[in-house]
Structure formats: C-alpha cells, structure tokens
Amino acid sequence: MKFHECTELTERVLDLARHLILVFLLHASIARPLGESGKLKLTTDMTELEVSIQSLLATGQPMGAKSTKGVKLSQIGDEYLALRSLRTILFSDLKTLANPVETVHLPIAIVLHHIIVHGPLRLPHEVLGWSEAEYVLWLQKHTPSEVIDLVEKAVDGQVDRTEEDEETVRLVREVLVHAKEAEAEAAGGEVEH
C-alpha cells in the first residue's frame, strides 16, 4: 500500500472516530433525568466508547504500515478532548459551568444542555416537538452561532418560570454571553450585550 493511501485510510478512520464521539456527546448531553446513578452509567459508557474507539483506530492501521504503535486517541483532537471534559463536568457544580475556562474543550451546545437537564426547563427539541435524533442531526448541520440562537429562543420562550427555573435561565444566559463574546473575538468584532 502506498504512503498516501495509508494516510488517507488513517484520516478516514479518525474522521469516523470524531463523528462517533460527537454523536455520543450530543445524545449524552440531552439525557434526562441525570441523577448520580445516571452520571455513573454515562461515565461507564464513555469508558466503553474510548475502548471501542481505540480498537477502531488499531483496526484502521493498514497492514504493512511503518508505525507499529498505531493511531492514538489524542490524534482525534477536539472531539476526544470534549469526551474527556464531559467526564469531568458531570460531577461539577453547575455554577462552575458558567466559567469558560472549565468548559474550554466542550462545544457550547453540550454545556448549555448540561445546565438545562439539571433544571426544570425543557430542552430546545422538546420545545420544538422534535425527536432527540432529529435534534442531534440539526445540531451537527448548524453552526455554533445558530445553536446559540436556538437555545436562547427555546429558553426565553418558556415563560411560566419558577424560582428554580430562573437560576437555570441565569446560568444559561451567562454561558451564552461568554459564548457570544468568544465568537465575536474569533471573528474580530465586538459582541452586543
């Protein structure tokens, strides 16, 4: 097998691993209710996913490839870092999620979902009447900016709120502000408050 074919196969396997992790993360982030036993089960699922992905990466090494070490999980990149980060925030205080440093490796949708599932508010797909699968597909096809807008509208559209709802809304809005600031900074502009 030629070098460029080996590289292409490795990249395809890495792309598949990235996709599998992202789909897992998105579905995991909207799992509800998420009590202590649910968090432990999710942690076990994440470990099993890592082992399966490692096996996939080893399988994706072409016969006769020069490297005997295979492809490492860390080569997956941002998706792998997000998987590792989710394990950490599952057991964190929700208020720490408003700090962008704590959630630096997580897509904004996952952070927002994590806050919402711990409160009484409905998730965007529940507000819109979409299935979980439809929502996850929508999330994969849209930009972080579009995700931010959808979550913001879904949260703002839930008008009959209790005091507990308001705390969740406050945290969601704080995360949204940080996300918009980061997005504006990346684009080289200013954010509206």
Image (cartoon, grey):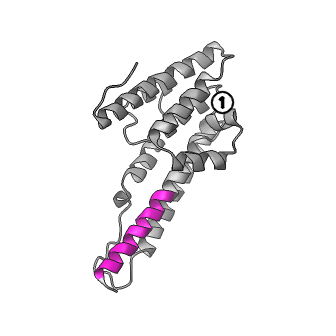
Residue at image mark 1: 122
Apparent side of residue 72 relative to residue 26 in the rendered image (left or right): left
Q: Quadrant of residue 169?
A: top right
For the question of whether residue 91 can be seen, the reply is: no
Residue 172 position, x and y percent, is: 51, 25
Classify mark 1: helix, strand or loop. loop
The stretch drawn in magenta includes residue 15: yes
* Residue at left offset 65%, top offset 22%: 158
| Number of numbered callouts drawn | 1
For the question of whether residue 69 can be seen, the reply is: yes
Q: Quadrant of residue 165?
A: top right
Which quadrant, please, contains the C terminus?
top left
Which quadrant, please, contains the N terminus?
bottom left
Taking depth in this image into account, of 181 and 48 the one nearest to the observer is 181
Q: Quadrant of residue 129?
A: top right
Residue 122 position, x and y percent, is: 66, 30
Task: Write down the region rendered in magenta.
Answer: 3-19
Taking depth in this image into account, of 178 and 147 the one nearest to the observer is 147
Task: Name the residue type under label 1.
Answer: Arg
The stretch drawn in magenta includes residue 8: yes
Up the image or down, 193 lies above or below 41; here it is above
Residue furthest top in the image:
163
Residue 123 position, x and y percent, is: 63, 33
Tell me if mark 1 has few (under 14), some (14-19) or many (20+) residues whose alpha carbon lies within 10 angstroms of its own: some
* Residue at left offset 52%, top offset 49%: 140
